[in-house]
Image (spheres, helix red, strand yellow):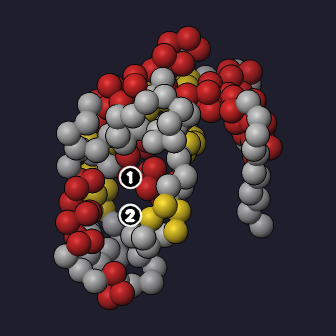
């Protein structure tokens, strides 16, 4: 049975720390971890458009307290938005510098094409390489509404692992086909 924890009305860094403490039980001293934040668009710090920087701080501190071997924080923004500028405007780059953690544009790690077994409308995707090289990926989404999913949470946040223009390729496919004709097992991003 999966567990869901909801925290509210507190310090974002502390709430994030406590949330991760409830679900992350591994010895991380030999692990590399990517905190995949949501900075798809360039927006002001703590505005709700991007992952809250203090949430990122809480997660970093949790991982540092457990002597995690390597911690990365990153995203790949939508086409036309400079990912590092988006991380900077969201306050995440500043938090990473203060905490001594590497903050990066996922596209800078290179591209890896992955086949989609049994793909119907998409048979392969170009992905940023880093998410496939770390031991653990922790998605740190922003709750946003979506016409097909209600709220997107990690569904859409992980779209930031797609490499550059493959993000727009999926939108073109979605807009060119009726969602009701898609197989039930297909996830709309």
| Tag of residue 180 | none
Q: Is 115 situated left or right of 57 in this image?
A: left
Q: Position of residue 52 (x, y in %)?
A: 56, 34
Vertical side of 38 occupied by 57: above or below: above
Classify 10 Å Cα crowding around label 1: few (below 14), some (14-19), many (20 and above).
Answer: many
Quick one: 60 or 111, which is closer to the camera? 60
- SS class, disc 1: helix
- SS class, disc 2: loop
Count all numbered tags in the image, as a single digit. 2
Quick one: 23 or 87, which is closer to the camera? 87
Vertical side of 127 occupied by 93: above or below: above
Classify 10 Å Cα crowding around label 2: few (below 14), some (14-19), many (20 and above).
Answer: some
Q: Which residue is mark 2?
A: 189
Q: Is 87 situated left or right of 8 in this image?
A: left
Q: Quadrant of residue 88?
A: top left
Vertical side of 186 occupied by 171: above or below: above
Quick one: 166 or 57, which is closer to the camera? 57
Q: Which residue is mark 1?
A: 159
Residue at left offset 28%, top offset 57%: 125
Q: Earlier in the sequence, mark 2 or mark 1?
A: 1
Q: Residue furthest bottom?
A: 181
Say whether marks 2 and 1 touch (CB < 8 Å): yes
Residue at left offset 23%, top offset 72%: 175
Residue at left offset 43%, top offset 30%: 44
Q: Position of residue 32 (x, y in %)?
A: 56, 30
Residue at left offset 50%, top offset 36%: 47
Mark yes or no: residue 28 visible: no
| Quadrant of the drawing holding the N terminus | bottom right
């Amino acid at each position: 049975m999966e567990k869901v924890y909801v925290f509210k009305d507190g310090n974002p860094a502390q709430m994030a720390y406590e949330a991760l403490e409830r679900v992350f039980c591994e010895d991380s001293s030999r692990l590399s971890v990517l905190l995949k934040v949501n900075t798809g668009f360039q927006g002001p710090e703590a505005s709700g458009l991007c992952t809250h920087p203090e949430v990122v701080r809480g997660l970093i501190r949790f991982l540092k307290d457990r002597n995690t071997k390597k911690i990365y924080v990153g995203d790949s923004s939508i086409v036309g938005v400079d990912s590092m500028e988006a991380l900077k405007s969201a306050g995440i780059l500043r938090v990473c510098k203060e905490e001594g953690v590497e903050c990066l544009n996922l596209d800078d790690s290179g591209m890896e094409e992955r086949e989609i077994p049994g793909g119907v409308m998409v048979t392969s995707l170009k992905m940023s390489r880093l998410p496939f090289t770390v031991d653990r990926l922790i998605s740190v989404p922003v709750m946003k509404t979506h016409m097909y999913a209600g709220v997107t949470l990690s569904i859409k946040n992980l779209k930031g692992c797609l490499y550059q223009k493959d993000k727009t390729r999926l939108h073109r496919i979605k807009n060119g086909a009726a969602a009701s004709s898609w197989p039930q097992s297909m996830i709309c991003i």
